[in-house]
Amino acid sequence: MAKSETPLLDELEKGKWPSFVTEIKKAAEKSPMAKDLLHQLELSYKDRIGHWKHGGIVGVKGYGSGVIGRYSDRPDLFPNVQAFHTIRVNHPSGWFYKTDALRSLCDIWDKHGSGLTNMHGSTGDAILLGTTTDHLQTCFDDLSEAGFDLGGSGSALRTPSCCVGPGRCEWACVDSLDLCHHLTMNFQDEIHRPMFPYKFKIKISACPNDCVASIARADFSVIGTWKGDIRIDPAEVEAYASSGLNIQREVCDLCPTRCMEWDGRQLKIFNEDCTRCMHCINLMPKALRPGEEQGATILVGGKAPIVEGALLSWVLVPFMKLEPPYGEIKDLILRIQDWWCDNGRSRERLGELIKRLGMRTFLRAIDIPAAPQMVKAPRTNPYVFFWPEDIQQEVK
Amino acid sequence: MATDIGPPDYKTMLPPVVRRNYGKWLYHEILKPGVLMHVGESGEALYTVRAGSPRLLSTDTLREICEIADSYCDGYLRFTSRHNIEFLVSDQTKVEPLLLELNRMNYSVGGTGHSISNIVHTQGWVHCHTPATDASGPVKALMDEIHEYFVTMTLPAHVRIALACCLNMCGAVHCSDIAILGIHRTVPKPDNSRVPNVCEIPTTVASCPTGAIRGDMKNKTVTINNDKCMYCGNCYTVCPAMPIADPDNDGISIWVGGKVSNARSAPMFSKLAIPYLPNNPPRWPEVVDAVKNIIEVYAAGARKHERVGEWIERIGWERFFSLTGIPFTDKHIDDFDMATETFRSSMQFKWR
Ligand code: HEM
Ligand code: SF4
Ligand code: SF4
Ligand code: SF4
Ligand code: SF4
C-alpha cells in the first residue's frame, strides 16, 4: 500500500466523534483547493504553526464586508490555496433550513469554492471556506439569485443571531426569530458597509437561559424575561413530585433567592423576591411557566478580551416590550451607535468606551434614566461627579 | 445583481408543525439522550433528534444530511448554536427509524440535558493567520475521549466546553464551564525590513494595550519592551510584519467555571486553571488528559444541577486545586488591570 501523505491528520480520522479531516478529504476528491488545504494543514501539524498570511482586502461590488481575504504563506507548495478567501453568508433566523435551500448553497459552493463550509461560524453565518478572488463576484451573484446575502465582517454590524425561541421553545418571552430577522433587514447598510469604530454585535436570547450567550459576546444583548408571577399548574407540580423529582431539594433549595416553599403538596412562590433565574421552570417545564407580561431586558457592552479585557453586558433597559415593528429598540440601537461613532476611538468596542467615558455620560447621551436594576450595588467610592445644573451657581 | 436582500426569511424554512405551533409550545421532555419532544397547546408534538457535527462540513456531507432530512423530516432541519445538527421530525413513527439510520451511518446522537454538548470552536490552522494552536484538531481529540458524556446525560449538570485558538477568541469562549484557549508566550518580532512598507507606525503603537511598543521613527519601525508584552497578538492583527507565532512556545491554557445562563447563579467568567500545556499534534494528549481529569473530578464531587463554576464556588478554589491535583502557581494570581478585585481580603479561606 502506498504510504499516506497525511499521516498526522489521518490519526484524527480515528475515534467516535465525526472527523473534520474526513470532511476535508471528501471535498479533496472533487476540489484541488480542498486537496491543497489538506496538505497545507498536514504541514501545520508537522511545523506546529499556521501557514496563512495576513488577509488582504477583497470583496464584492457595493459591499465593504462579508468576505475575508486569505492567502497561503507557502504558495510554492500549495498553489491551489494561494488565495483561499472566506465568504460569510447570512443565515436564516434560528438556523432553520429547508433542504432545497441548503442544497442550493451546496451547488453554488461546489461551483465556486472548495466545497468546505462551517455550519456555522460562531457569530452565526454559514461560512463558505475558501475560494479565489475571481470567483467572489460570480459566487455572490449566484448566492443572491438563490436568495442568500452576505453577513458582516470588519468594523460593521455583525450578522445578528438568535436562539430558537418561539420556533420550538416554550420558554420564549420574545419572538427572537422575528426580531432578529427584522433587525437584520433594517440594518443591511450597517452590516455590509463598515462604518463603525469596530465590530458591533447583536444577539437575542428569548429567555434568561441565554442559549446564544448573548450576555458574553454581544455589544447589544437582548434577553427575554417577564414581569409578574410565575404561572403554576398545581396538578403538574404534584405529577412531578410523584414521578420522583425531589421538589424540596432540587427546586426549592436551589432557588437562589429562596423564594419557594413546598409543603409536600403545594408549591408557593413569593414572586416579589424571585429574580427570574429560570431554575425552577427549567426543572418543571410542564408545571411552571414564565409570567404573562413578557418582554426583554436590554444589556450592553459584552465582548471577548481583546483589547481592554473581557466584559459581560450590563443592564441598560430593565424591561422593554418587543413587538413589530420594533420602533423603540431600533431607535435605541441608533442612539447608541451614534454616540459610539461620535466618541469611540478606532478599535474601541462599545463596552470599552462606556468604561472610559462613564456610564453616567452614556446614559445621558442616549437618554435612558438611571435605575437600580443597572447595578449590583451603588458605588462605594466617594468621588462623585455632578452635572453643572446640580450645583448652585456662584452669585456674581 | 441585487444587493442587501438580507437573509432568507426564516418563515420559509420552518416545518409546518412549527408554523402551526409557533409561540404556542407548552412543554418539552427529553425522551432519551439526543431526543427531544416539544408539545404544543394544540397537543401536536415535534420530535428533535440532535446529532454531533465537526462543524467543518463538506458539501457532500451536507447533501447527505439533506437526504436524511428528506426521508424522515419532510425536508426540514436546523443547526444549533453549538454547531450540532437537529433533525426535526413531525411524525412520531419516524423517530426510531431515523435513530437506526443515524446509528448505521455512525452519527453520534446526544448533547441534550446534563451532557457535554458539542465544543464551540474557531478556525485554527485550517483558516486563520493568528492561531497559537489548531482548533478542530484538539476538539476532535477531546470529543473522541469524552464521547460517552455526549451520548449520555450522567453529569451533575450541563458542561459547556469551548475552544479558541488565540486571545481574539472568535468563539467568545471566556464564559464556558471549561475553556480551552490557545496562547502565545513569546514577544512578537518586528521585521524591520517589512514594517516600514506594510504598517502604519502610530496605529501599531496604539494597538498595544500595555504600551509595550515604541515607535522608532528614525528607522521607520517599532521596538518592543519585552517586559511589558503579554503576548496578546493585537499588534500583529494591525501590523502583519510583527509575527508572534512560535512553534516551540505556543500552546494551550485551560480555564474553568464560567457560564452564561442566569439559572441559579449569575453569568460568570471562566478562571485560569492551567496556564500552559504544549501543542502536541495530532492528538494533544496533555490537553485531553487535563480536561478529562477536570470533568471527572467535577462529576464525582458536584451535587445534582451544580454547574462547574457553582461547584467550585461551593468547595472553594483551594479544594479545586487539591482535588484536581493541578498545581497552583504565581501565574494564577492576576497582575493585570483589575487584579486587586481578585485578591482575598478576609480570613474566610480553607486550608486545602
Ligand atoms: C484570520 C483571522 C480570523 C479568522 C479566520 C476568523 C474567523 C472567524 C469566524 C469564521 C467567525 C465566525 C463568524 C460568523 O459566524 O459570522 C469569527 C467570529 C469572531 N471573531 Fe474572528 N477571525 C479572525 C480574526 C479575528 C480577530 C483579529 C478578532 C479580534 C480582534 C476576532 C474576533 C472574533 C470574535 C470576538 C468573533 C465572534 C465570536 C462570537 O460572537 O461568538 N477574529 N471569526
Ligand atoms: S434562550 Fe430560552 S427561549 Fe431561547 S432557546 Fe434557550 S431556553 Fe429557549
Ligand atoms: S425563577 Fe429562580 S429565583 Fe425565581 S422562583 Fe424559580 S428558582 Fe427561584
Ligand atoms: S480565535 Fe484567533 S486564531 Fe482562532 S480563528 Fe479567531 S482570530 Fe483566528
Ligand atoms: S503582543 Fe500585545 S502586548 Fe505584546 S507588543 Fe503586541 S500588542 Fe503589545
Image (cartoon, coloured by chain):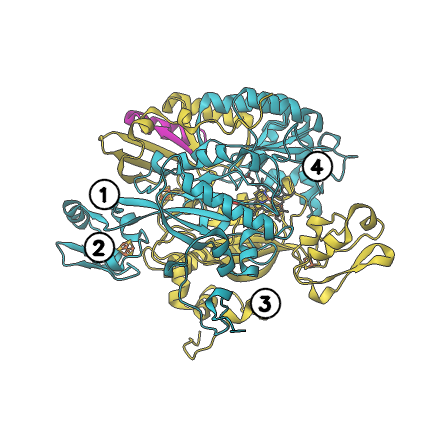
* Residue drawn at (37%, 27%) of the image: B98
Q: Within the image, what quadrant is residue A206 found in?
A: top left
Q: What segment is highlighted magenta in the picture?
A: B85-109
**Direction from residue A274 to residue B200 in the image, left or right:** right
The yes-or-no answer for disc 4 within 8 Å of ligand 1 is no
- Chain represented in yellow: B
x, y (%) of residue A276?
A: 31, 53
Q: Which residue is mark 2?
A: A246
Label 1 to label 3: alpha-carbon separation: 47 Å
Pointers 2 and 1 in contact (C-beta within 8 Å): no
- Of badges 3 and 4, the one in the foreground is 4
Q: Which residue is mark 4?
A: A57
x, y (%) of residue B309?
A: 42, 59
Label 1 to label 4: alpha-carbon separation: 52 Å
Q: Are marks 1 and 4 on the same chain?
A: yes
Residue B107: say if magenta: yes
| Mark nearer the N terminus (2 vs 4) | 4
Label 3 to label 4: alpha-carbon separation: 39 Å
- Of badges 1 and 3, the one in the foreground is 1
Amino acid beneath label 1: Lys
Q: Secondary structure at mark 1?
A: loop
Chain A hue?
cyan
| Mark nearer the N terminus (1 vs 4) | 4
Quadrant showing the N terminus of chain A: top right
Q: Are marks 2 and 1 on the same chain?
A: yes
Label 2 to label 1: alpha-carbon separation: 15 Å
x, y (%) of residue B204?
A: 73, 54
State the mark number for residue A286: 1
* Residue drawn at (27%, 31%) of the image: B45
Q: Secondary structure at mark 4?
A: loop
| Mark nearer the N terminus (2 vs 1) | 2
Q: Which residue is mark 3?
A: B331
